[in-house]
Amino acid sequence: MEPIDILIDDIYIPAKHRRRTVDQKAVDELAENILEVGGLKAPILVRPDGARYVLVSGLHRLEACKALGEETISGLVVQSRKH
C-alpha cells in the first residue's frame, strides 16, 4: 500500500478525535521534525467517505502539517468500520 497526497481540507476529524486534547508540545516537536527531515516519517491513516476522507489515525501529525501551512499530507487509505 503506497501513501498518497491528500488535501488537508478534504480530511474530516471525527468527534472522538476532536474531543481529545491536542498536545501542543507534541505538535510543535512534530512540526520541527517535519522541517528537519523534509516530510512525515509515517503517513496518517484515513478512510474514504464520499468526496472526503475521515481521519483514522494521526491527529498530531495532521495538526503539525496544518501548523506548517501545508495544503497536503501523506496518507494511507484504509478500509475501516464506521463507529
Image (spheres, rainbow, N blue to C red):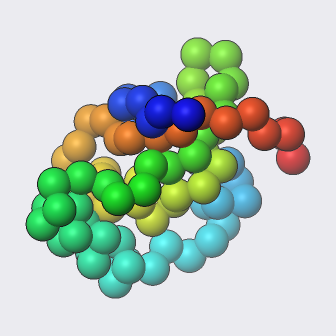
Q: Residue at x 45, y 79 (%)?
A: 23
Task: Tell me where residue 25 appears, x and y as whole percent.
Answer: 34, 83
- Pick whichever, 11 or 32, lies toward us: 32
Image position of 19 (left or right of 72) = right
Instruction: Report which quarter residue 9 is drawn in.
Output: top left
Q: Residue furthest left?
A: 36
23 over 3 or under it: above or below: below
5 over 45 or under it: above or below: above
47 over 51 or under it: above or below: below
Image position of 63 (left or right of 52) = left
Task: Tell me where residue 57 appears, x and y as whole percent.
Answer: 60, 55
Q: Residue furthest front?
A: 1
- Pick whichever, 30 or 8, lies toward us: 30
Image position of 82 (left or right of 45) = right
Task: Tell me where residue 42 appears, x and y as whole percent.
Answer: 42, 56
Q: Residue at x 56, y 34 (%)?
A: 1
Q: Residue at x 78, y 39 (%)?
A: 80
Would you say residue 9 is visible in this rendering? Answer: no
Q: Residue furthest bottom?
A: 25
Task: Tell me where residue 54 appears, x and y as whole percent.
Answer: 63, 38
Image position of 15 (left or right of 60) = right
Q: Residue at x 60, y 40 (%)?
A: 46
Instruction: Report which quarter residue 78 is drawn in.
Output: top right
Would you say residue 25 is visible in this rendering? Answer: yes
